[in-house]
Amino acid sequence: MTVEPRQRQRLSPNGDDWPSCLENDPDPPRQLNVDGCLAHIEGPTVAIVGTRRCTAYGRAIAAEFAAALSKAGISVVSGLARGIDTQAHRSALDAGGAMPIAVVGSGLDVVYPAQNAALWREVAHGGAVVSEYHDARPAAPWQFPQRNRIIAAFADVVLVVESHERGGALSTVNEALRRGRTVMAVPGSVRSPASRGTNRLIADGAEPALEVGDIIVALGLAMPTQPSLLTTDVLDDELRLLLEALGIDGAAIDDVLVRLGGSFGWRQSQLQRLEDLGRVANVDGWWTPLG
Amino acid sequence: MLAAVSSSVLAGIDGRAVTVEVHAANGLPGFAIVGLPDATVREARDRVRAAVLSSGYAWPDVRLTVNLAPSGERKVGSGLDLAIAVGILVVAQVIPDDRAREFSFIGELGLDGSVRRVPGMLSLVDAARRRRVVVSPDAAIEAGLVGDRDVCVAPTLRDLVGALRDGLPWGDAVTPQTRPSVAAVPDLRDVRGQPAARLALEVAAAGGHHVLMVGPPGSGKTMLATRLPGLLPPLDDQAALEVLRIRSAAGLLDGVSELPRQPPFEAPHHSCTPVALVGGGAYRLRPGAISHAHGGVLFLDELAEFPAGHLDQLRQPLEEGIVRIDRAVGRVAFPARIQLVAAMNPCPCGADGKPGTCVCSDQRRLLYRRRVSAPLLDRFDLRITVRRPDASLFMSDHETESTDVVAQRVMAARARAQSRGVRCNAELRGADLGEHCRLSARGHDLATEWLESGEVSARGLHRLQRVALTLADLAGDDREIGEDQLWSARGLRAPFRGPHGFAA
């Protein structure tokens, strides 16, 4: 299927298409350039934001929440950065429900980061890629916190999946609070540096997002089906034992072999099965439990 | 008066037969060497003259022209000294011409008339035209390794004349005082924990697969690599001769007392030049590290620190087992059948691999990993991550298998591989895999599943099959390749794509 490239739209505050959520904004952009269709913005929206240096856990949660929200007809807003943003866009697109919206920190002709070129095009075709900068503006460090205020303005709920103690995602949180948006955070291990920011947010009063249902409730919507965060399949004893042996922080296959024994190939196949079930993630040979 | 004496010179690591022609003419006395001699050969003039005079023979009062035939090829090295001296003594009618024609002469002369060994004795003797070869006492054992030659020993030029003219007995061979050329190989027992890495090492030894180890500093990559030669089967006669030929030609040996049986282990530093790695040189073509490792292990530590251009030069030799050097001074082929073992850090900061400990950005990790080109990465059948072992495991006196135990299994597995007509499974071609590597019904299903999901490419599956076959050989299993072996093979071949390798 070939998708006709749509005309690039240029919105200004006085135009008919100017998003209503920007009308009373304390710091609105002077103009918006849009590739794609920004119509979803008028429906329910959730911003999924988080660190670029995310862990396998954060990636898995971003994927799960984004997919469930998209299927529930809720648009995911994010920033097309590496890490959490990338995963949120990717999963929302693949779920095939409501299409995601990306607010980027460079001009629309400057794809940044370059690895996301394909994802960028897909978001533009299915949903919308939005920028307040002129088309050829290169990416600059100060532009990313600035575009965060638009992400916050676009979203009904801002969900932080993972954030380091001083992450860029926290600037989105501040902008959201300034605009009276609900801020939610996904709790993580207290040992994980990538969850330090989100855990702190929860301690400071942000609502914890334990499952997708929590977000739906925060939006004031009913959930058509209620998928649980935890997969409900039953593991057989061998796999449960293996999962326990991985501990909280995960382990390498060496540790599994030392702790439980068994042949290398068999353990490898078991770990792979756990990964296929979504219970563990493998990063550079390190198996981390996700459940 | 004309004399023709047989000798040989080195070209690369091979010998080439040379005829030393000496012509004596009336006229102003003089001594010229023609036939593309290099500096060391030209200096033979002065050494030969001094040696002849010190041995008590008169220098012929004639115009001497020495021609080195074939005269179009460059000659290097001092091994022609002895032949030139014999030629001159023939025209001076000290040595009977017909006796001199029975022998080839290879050796350097001292000013006092003593005969000395030269590098590459094995190849030089092998190339000599005559069945009987005269060499120095300390070169006799090395020369004798060629097998089909009569080695005659001449300690000095006088002894040589005595044997040729007066029928005196030849001298006795001397066993050279050699330093052990290779240190004793460390034992696998010293490696604590690391079950996956140990398995990979055993599979590598049994199947001849190239190994890439990725792990933080201090995780034991070098320790593991140095244990590989001990697991490999000892060199057979042919391989041992090739190894000796290379070492001898490179002038690395003080002398030879026996054939080397231990597979070589070469670990060039990442600052080395391309020539040091693959061979070459300005006017004398020398073998590089890849040839010195022939029949054994080439260990490239800090693989990502090697300039990419150097590494890609290894690709063709890795396929062919031979490195061809083409230069203005000539063209040679060095043997280079090696097992490549490489080690690198997962990222520039060298964190220990647990999530969250690395401080590198994804971009830096990606750039670091991309220094190793995809075609080279593809040649590693085994790609494993190595981690620092658990403290508890490290301090325990848990008994681990020694090199001897594992080497036995490796020998048995190699014997199985040889029944397929190859030295090891890594040499099996894709076309032969269908015949030798039958998948069980469940193994077939698993492989199909991997191919269909795109997790494994068709080419990748061939590599997995080779490793699976080696695993079966090690287990002494003659049946079809099953799920367990395929899973192990896959676990031993991590994809190393993207900044985090395994992750997409």
Image (spheres, rainbow, N blue to C red):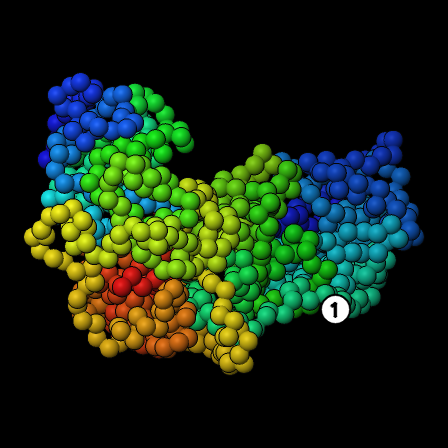
Asked whether the viewer can see residue B447, the reply is: no
Depth check, front residue: B158 or B1: B158
In the image, residue B393 above or below residue A185: below
The quadrant holding residue A213 is bottom left
Q: Position of residue A73 (x, y in %)?
A: 11, 44
Asked whether the viewer can see residue B443, the reply is: yes
Q: Position of residue B50 (x, y in %)?
A: 88, 46
Depth check, front residue: A259 or B185: A259
Q: How many marks?
A: 1
In the image, residue A132 above or below residue B332: above
Q: Residue at x 48, y 72 (%)?
A: B193
Q: Residue at x 21, y 53 (%)?
A: A64
Residues packed near mark 1 inside 10 Å, few (<14), some (14 to 19) or many (20 plus): some
Query: In the shown orientation, is residue B315 left or right of residue B168?
Result: left
Chain bearing mark 1: B
Query: In the shown orientation, is residue A118 left or right of residue A169?
Result: left
Quarter of the N terminus of chain B within the rendering: top right
Looking at the image, which residue sits at the far left? Answer: A224
The quadrant holding residue B73 is top right
Q: Position of residue B214 (x, y in %)?
A: 46, 56
Query: In the shown orientation, is residue B430 left or right of residue A258?
Result: left
Q: Position of residue A71 (x, y in %)?
A: 12, 48
| Residue corresponding to mark 1 | B175
Q: Secondary structure at mark 1?
A: loop
Q: Residue at x 40, y 30 (%)?
A: A142
Q: Residue at x 25, y 69 (%)?
A: B483
Q: Amino acid at mark 1?
A: Thr
Depth check, front residue: B36 or B278: B278
The quadrant holding residue B441 is bottom left
Query: In the shown orientation, is residue B180 left or right of residue A263?
Result: right
